[in-house]
Image: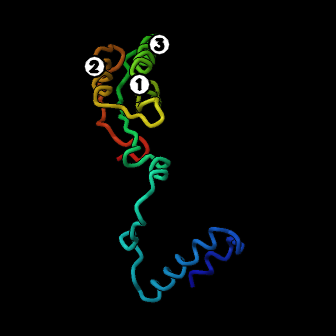
């Protein structure tokens, strides 16, 4: 019986999880008794989302795009990398982009998107970053990804 597994949750009658999950638990119990496999394909989508919800979820016309890149450092010391990062920050400021990334001794990975709340990186931004990276001597083996959804990675 599947309800025994959930007995340790201690849900009160006023708890929204209890009210929301009861129909789901009933459907799962019914499906188990009917020997119907429960998969994601059995779930139907809800009614279309309101503009407010689309904006909150950053989907459809409010989707935010960005792109990633990675490369290998050829510098031996951190002082030699300072001009690279200073130039990268300057490029980000002039293009109104923000960057999130990480590095170790030789590999640098980053993801760039617009610094505006609902703004997106454009193909022009991507080309400018590619052009700037090609002119750098401190980083090699650079690969720049295509534009993708910054929140959902699609």
The one nearer the camera, 51 or 56, is: 51
Circle 3 crowding by C-alpha within 10 Å: few under 14, some 14–19, many from 20: few
Picture layout, residue 101 above or below residue 51: above
The one nearer the camera, 138 or 20, is: 20
Alpha carbon of mark 2 to alpha carbon of mark 1: how far? Answer: 21 Å
Precedes in sequence: disc 1 or disc 3: 3
Precedes in sequence: disc 2 or disc 1: 1
Which quarter of the figure is the N terminus placed in? bottom right
Picture layout, residue 6 above or below residue 54: below
Precedes in sequence: disc 2 or disc 3: 3
Circle 2 crowding by C-alpha within 10 Å: few under 14, some 14–19, many from 20: few
Question: Quarter-wise, where is residue 127 in the image?
Answer: top left
Residue lying at 34% horizontally and 47% vertically, measured from the top left: 154
The residue where tag 2 is placed is 131
Image spot of residue 137 (x, y percent): 32, 13
Q: Residue furthest front?
A: 51
Image spot of residue 147 (x, y percent): 31, 37
Residue lying at 45% horizontally and 83% vertically, measured from the top left: 31
Image spot of residue 41 (x, y percent): 35, 70
Q: Is residue 10 visible?
A: no
The residue where tag 1 is placed is 106
Q: How many marks?
A: 3
Q: Determine whether the residue tagged by mark 1 lies in a helix, strand or loop.
A: loop
Residue lying at 58% horizontally and 71% vertically, measured from the top left: 20
Q: Are marks 1 and 3 in contact (CB under 8 Å)?
A: no
Q: Determine whether the residue tagged by mark 2 lies in a helix, strand or loop.
A: helix
Image spot of residue 123 (x, y percent): 28, 30
Q: Determine whether the residue tagged by mark 3 lies in a helix, strand or loop.
A: helix
Q: Nearer the viewer, mark 2 or mark 3?
A: 2
Q: Are marks 2 and 1 in contact (CB under 8 Å)?
A: no
The residue where tag 3 is placed is 82
């Amino acid at each position: 019986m599947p309800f025994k597994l959930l007995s340790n949750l201690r849900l009160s009658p006023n708890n929204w999880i209890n009210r929301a999950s009861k129909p789901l638990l009933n459907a799962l119990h019914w499906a188990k008794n009917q020997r119907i496999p429960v998969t994601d394909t059995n779930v139907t989508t809800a009614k279309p989302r309101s503009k407010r919800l689309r904006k909150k979820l950053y989907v459809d016309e409010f989707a935010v795009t960005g792109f990633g890149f990675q490369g290998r450092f050829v510098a031996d010391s951190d002082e030699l990398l300072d001009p690279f990062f200073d130039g990268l920050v300057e490029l980000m400021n002039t293009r109104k982009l923000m960057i999130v990334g990480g590095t170790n001794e030789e590999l640098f990975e980053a993801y760039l998107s617009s610094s505006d709340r609902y703004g997106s990186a454009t193909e022009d931004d991507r080309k400018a970053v590619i052009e700037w990276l090609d002119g750098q001597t401190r980083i090699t083996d650079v690969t720049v990804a295509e534009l993708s959804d910054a929140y959902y990675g699609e």
